[in-house]
Amino acid sequence: MDRAQWEADQIRGVALALRHWFDVADTESRMRELGIRPRAERKTSKAPDKRLQAFALTALPPQIVRLNPDAPVSTLHFLQTVYDDGEMRADPWRWWFAWISIEMISRLGPDPSGRQVKNFIRTDDSLQSVRHTAARWLASSEIRVEYVNREFKALLRQALEDQDVSADRDSLIDRLGQPLVVFIEAMASEAGRISAGITAQLAERVERM
C-alpha cells in the first residue's frame, strides 16, 4: 500500500470515528413533537397549537444536527471551518453540511476539493425537496443573501458549465437569471467548502500520526 492510499484510509477512519459524535434529529419530527405541526396519527389526543403554526414556515435544514456535549475537545479542531470560515459562523445549515461531509468522507474517502459533497447536494435524488426549497437556505442568513447577490452571475455561469449547457451562456444568463439554479449552486458550494475544510483538518491529523 502506497503512502497516499494509507493516508486516505486513515482519513476515512478518523471520519468514521468522528461521525459518532453527531446527534441528528429529523426537523419535521421535532416539529410534530413540539406541537408545531399535527402528528402523523389520524387520531391524536391533543390538537396542534394553532398559535405555533407560524413556526412551520422554517428556514431550517431537513435534519437538526448538533455536536454531542460529550464529544472530546479535539473534535472542535476538525470542525473549525464549521464554526468560522472567516465569513460564516456555525448555524443549523453548516452543521447539516458538516454531518453530510463526515458521512461521505467516512464512506468514500477524502474530499480535498469539496467536489464530492457539492455534487451530492446538487444531484442526489434524496435531496430533491431540499433543492426545490433552496430559498430556505438563502433566507436563513443575511450573509448568504449578500453572497448570492454579489456572486449571482458567476454562480449561474458555474452552474450552467457544470450542467454542460451548450448555448450562448452570457446571453442565457442575462435573459433568464434562473434564481433557483443559483441558489442551489451557492448552497452546494458552501457545502463543498465545508467538506474541503474538514478534509484538510483530518489530513493534518493523519500527517502527525
Image (cartoon, grey):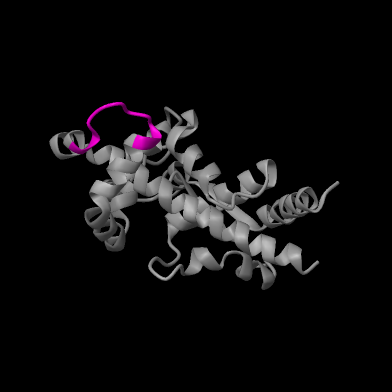
Image location of residue 25, percent across then percent down: 53, 48
Above or below 173: residue 8: below
- Given residues 9 and 29, the one toward you in this image is 9
- Whether residue 58 is visible here, answered yes or no, is no
- Give the quadrant of residue 200: bottom right
- At 36% from the left and 41% from the top, the residue drawn is 37
Residue 72 relative to residue 164: left or right: right
- Given residues 183 and 196, the one toward you in this image is 196
- At 34% from the left and 42% from the top, the residue drawn is 158
- Given residues 27 and 88, the one toward you in this image is 88
Residue 21 drawn in magenta: no
- Whether residue 26 is visible here, answered yes or no, is yes
Image location of residue 205, percent across then percent down: 72, 66
Quarter the C terminus occupies: bottom right
Image location of residue 62, percent across then percent down: 44, 43
Give the magenta part as a residue range.
161-170
- Give the quadrant of residue 123: top left
Residue 194 relative to residue 152: left or right: right
Image location of residue 52, percent across then percent down: 30, 51
From the image, give the main secondary structure of the stretch colored magenta: loop
